[in-house]
Image (cartoon, helix red, strand yellow):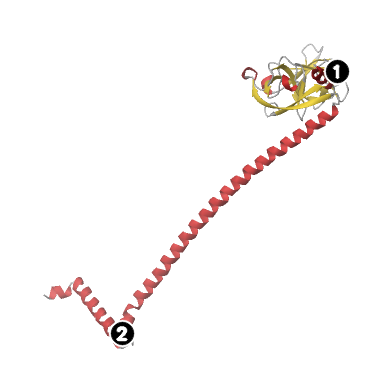
Amino acid sequence: MFRIFKSKLFLLILATVIILIGIGISAGRGGRNGWAGSLINTAFSPFQKFFTFAGQRIESGLTFLKDIKAVKEENERLRKQVEQLTKENATLKSYEDKIQELRKALNLKDRFSDYDAIGANIIATDMGNWFNVFIIDRGSRDGIRVNYPVISGNGLVGYVVSADPFTSKIVAITDMDSTVYGRIIKTGDLVRVRGDLSLKDQGLCVMDHIDTNVDVAYGDIIETSGLGGIYPKGIVIGKVRQVVQSENDLYRYAIIEPAVDFKKLEEVVVLIKKSDAEMGSVD
């Protein structure tokens, strides 16, 4: 029997009973604190403080977790907003570039009073001549004919090689079948620019058989000379990127970087001689 009273379980039950009796006495006195109530309050004071502290900590922890969730949601919202603004800025930049190119094209149009200009979109490329042969969405019904020059806002693109009623095929100046008679703006010397097999995939041309007495250097601008019967005078072809001396020193050639970036080309302008347009209207 004595062992039972000494057991921890018995002592715990006894302490619980005493506490409950104390709580009952305190409640029965209308909440007034007697000596028993004071004793109980004193005994439970550390526990009350602990649970109060624990409750406050739990509440703070829950508030902290809610704040973290709110911050994450706000960060996600701001991230999506930044992505949207980035896309909008890229779109605006694209529109701005197109506007600038159209303005340049209009300036080119103003320079050639003998020509009418028809804007066209590139709708396809010749797979066998990547970035060297283009298909545009204008054709013979729009007055386009073979050998008409094609330009962009930056300079010379090429010429029309064939025209159907609704589409036309354009050969770029980088193609091997292209030859442009030009002049060096700095000196006025006449030169010939043509497509080259080894350079066309790089979007470059060659200015070949340059006489030794011609003053040509890196950065010189080349424009059309008006000779050859296709291109009017004064359209920028490109600039000299490198001058190479031949092994026998009899002539030189130069690598030409076209003014037009054919890999990014989307719109072009076809130049139509007004005399041709008038003849077509009479027919």
For the N terminus, which image quadrant? bottom left
Secondary structure under the numbered disc 1 in the rendered image: strand
Q: Are discs 2 and 1 less than 8 Å apart at CB?
A: no
Q: Quadrant of residue 116?
A: top right
Judge left or right: residue 276 versus residue 122: right
Secondary structure under the numbered disc 2 in the rendered image: helix
Q: Which mark is residue 125?
A: none
**Residue 161, percent across and down?**
72, 16
- Count of residue discs: 2
**Residue 212, percent across and down?**
85, 16
Q: Nearer the viewer, residue 12 or 125?
A: 125
For the C terminus, which image quadrant? top right
Type of amino acid at the residue the image marks with label 1: Leu
Point 75% across, 25% down: residue = 257
Does the rendering let one see residue 259? Answer: no
**Residue 64, percent across and down?**
47, 61
Point 22% across, 78% down: residue = 17
Does the rendering let one see residue 117? Answer: yes
Q: Quadrant of residue 276?
A: top right
Q: Nearer the viewer, residue 192 or 41?
A: 192
In this view, the residue farthest toward the left is 1
Mark nearer the N terminus (2 vs 1): 2
Residue named by callout 1: 190
Judge left or right: residue 204 versus residue 9: right
Residue named by callout 2: 37
Dot 2: within a 10 Å radius of its alpha carbon, few (fewer than 14), some, or many (20 or more) residues? many
Type of amino acid at the residue the image marks with label 2: Gly
**Residue 130, percent across and down?**
64, 21
| Mark pair 2, 1: CA separation | 116 Å
